[in-house]
Image (cartoon, helix red, strand yellow):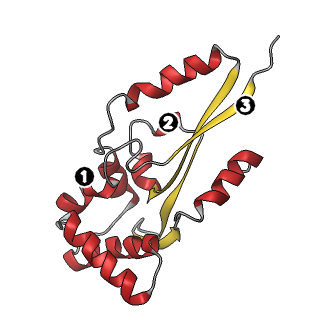
Amino acid sequence: MTTLLRTAIVYDFDGTLAPGNMQEHSLLPEYLRITPEEFWKRVGEDKKKADADQILTYLRHLLLRASEIGKPITREVLREHGARVPFFEGVTTWFDRIDEHARARNLALEHYVISSGNEEMIEGTSIFPKFRRVFASKYFYDAENVARWPAVAINYTTKTQYLFRINKGID
């Protein structure tokens, strides 16, 4: 009997599996009623003014905008909008195809995401079950399931710690 060699593919999400930033497809324009251009302009201005982390700033701005218009950000809202994120051509069939390719080569293939995008939105996508684990930015929720504060913010430099976790088998 042949032992399968554990192998991983690690994906970013925005611009890798799906075009643009996941929030731009429906969350910003439809739920939060703000253009992506205006939203990212506000984020950029605050980031610069406070010399702040870009990811923490955008997570904060989602909550600020929701408060401005009286529409809370909940886990369900993020998942619903995640379900509407389009993928690049071939992404939805990629996982089955590459898994079969790996099996033919005695590889036990695992798929991971490390993203600055919203974990809750990724959970709403049709491809979420394909991943062994998703490491992404996410919120802390109150008793009513309303997002109150960023619980995890993954930026370009912190992504490396998740690669280390995957390599060491630490979930």
Up/down of 148 relative to 111, above or below: below
What separation in Å lies between label 3 and label 1 (alpha carbons)? 35 Å
* Other-residue count near label 1 (Cα within 10 Å), few / some / many at <14 / 14–19 / ≥20: some
Q: Residue 5: x, y in percent?
A: 75, 26
Q: Residue 34: x, y in percent?
A: 18, 68
| Residue receiving disc 2 | 129
Residue type (three-letter) at the residue carrying disc 1: His
* Other-residue count near label 2 (Cα within 10 Å), few / some / many at <14 / 14–19 / ≥20: few
Reading the chain from its start, which is encountered first: label 2 or label 3?
3
Tell me the element at label 1.
Answer: loop
- In-image side of 28 versus 142 (left or right): left
Residue type (three-letter) at the residue carrying disc 3: Arg
Q: Residue 160: x, y in percent?
A: 63, 58
| Residue receiving disc 3 | 6
Return the residue nearer the eye: 21 or 133.
Answer: 21
| Residue receiving disc 1 | 25
Q: Residue 37: x, y in percent?
A: 21, 67
